[in-house]
Amino acid sequence: MATSLQYGEEHTLDIPREYAPARTLARLFFATFWLVIFTGAIRKWMFPNATILYILQDIPIAMAYAYAFSKGIFDRGMLLAGILLLSVILTLQGLLQIIVSGLNPFVFAVGLHNYLFYLPMLVVFPVCLTEKHRRNFVRWYLLSSIPMCVLAIAQAESPLTAFINHTTEGDAFGVPGADVARVSGTFNFVLFYALWVGIGVALNLGEWLMPRERRVIQRRWLLIVCTVSINLCHLVSASRLAISNAAVAILGGVICAVAVRSVRAIAVILGILLMLPLVAGVTYLISPNEANIIVERFTGKGYQQEGLSRVEQTLDGFLTEPPLSLIGAGIGVGVDAAHVGSVDAYNYTYQLSEEDTIRNVMELGTVVGLLYIAVRIGFLFGIVFLAFRIVRSGSSPHVLPLAIFIATDGYIGDLTRSATMTATQVMIGCCFILSAYFHPDHAAVTDAAIDPQLVRYA
């Protein structure tokens, strides 16, 4: 049986610096990553009224699509076929809604963009993200947590009206009943920041689970600084979502440590779990108001009931709440950007549902909506299964905590209302996982023979 390294040498995408188109796609991937981080800062602090910047990160993504398809560098497997079939079904349903119920064509176009535009990232970017590029991604992600942590602490310590807490809508979103800002870092809204935090915690845990000689960040003190920083980012946020996202990622790290059947990995995870109370103590010293508020939001009776109700809604609400309708309210009706310029732009979502999956069924109609949800959930479970196989093969341990977090967020989180930030980040994480399938870590595959099916190329 050939090793995956030998298998890769029989194909065209083995060494990125010898294959210029793959290197170009990798650059566009990183351009997308950096724009995700800084678009919010540009919008809220420099050009708060420039709505067009809402799609700034779409530029490198669209360029990557055009370049990849012109060069033929994309995965032609079942994933592409599934994306094309889903695109045809949603497009036909949207056209039917225009004809039958008079759906505004602009709303239709925005809705189609939010549902479908980011899906081809899954067949374009993974084929170019070799081990070298994944290591660079992990390095820059974790290092960026240090300045983000400094910014988060500054926002937590500043009043709602401070410039540093501005959003595109004005002052920061505060916590009900308290003069405390919900930290959002460089992002425009805490939802996007919480998603960034969850991915960062997952990557950080994956780095600790790597053997020391294979880690991206070799200096232990620097890795500890990154660990403290990424965890302070959610602990000072006054956001239940950010802390819950981090908790899911940590759970993924525990599962990964058990999956690799390594005493060292389990010991590392236990060490991190023991360190978290210390980081929480540091959070209280830095910002006691934020710490007290978040304790109240997790333990207060009213907050607990509200949280439990929302969890129950997200688990099966898409089956029980949407009224039976073959046509639906209209694809994109619950997307804020589809109503730009309207004074009620932010109310259209709530007229349907704040929960993404419930709103999807209401927008698309019962049959098409449930089909979309089934595909969405099926893909997320598939990503977890694939990540488990990758980790068990001895390759990148980052992928399993990341996959478990992404699957959880993709199931209960927002992928369509604010897709420019939410779907983009989820797709970036999925691309990282799929790239470890296309291009396993060389250090891992040279130690043991791996099923060649784990390494296939476009």
Image (cartoon, rainbow, N blue to C red):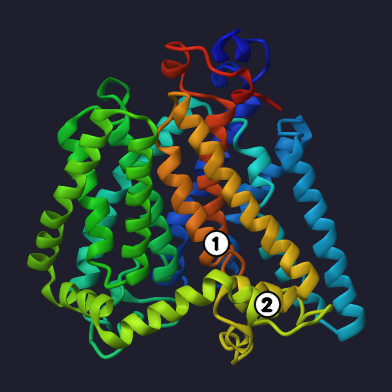
Q: Image quadrant of residue 105?
A: bottom right
Q: Residue at x 43, y 55 (%)?
A: 37
- Above or below, comparing residue 256 to residue 92 in the picture: above
Between disc 2 and disc 1, the foreground one is 1
Mark earlier in primary sequence (2, 1): 2
Q: Image quadrant of residue 115?
A: bottom right
Label 1 amino acid? Tyr
Q: Does the CB distance between marks 2 and 1 fall below 8 Å?
A: no
Q: Which residue is mark 1?
A: 411
Q: Looking at the image, which is closer to me, 329 or 388? A: 388
**Mark number, residue 172:** none
Q: Residue furthest right?
A: 99
Q: Residue furthest left?
A: 285
Count neighbours of disc 1 (C-alpha within 10 A) and say few if under 14, some if 14 to 19, many if 20 or more.
Answer: many
Label 2 amino acid? Ala
Q: Which residue is mark 2?
A: 338
Give x and y (percent) for residue 430. Answer: 55, 45
Give x and y (percent) for residue 278. Answer: 10, 55
Q: Residue at x 92, y 79 (%)?
A: 99
Separation of marks 2 and 1 at Cα, in angstroms: 23 Å
Q: Residue at x 61, y 70 (%)?
A: 357
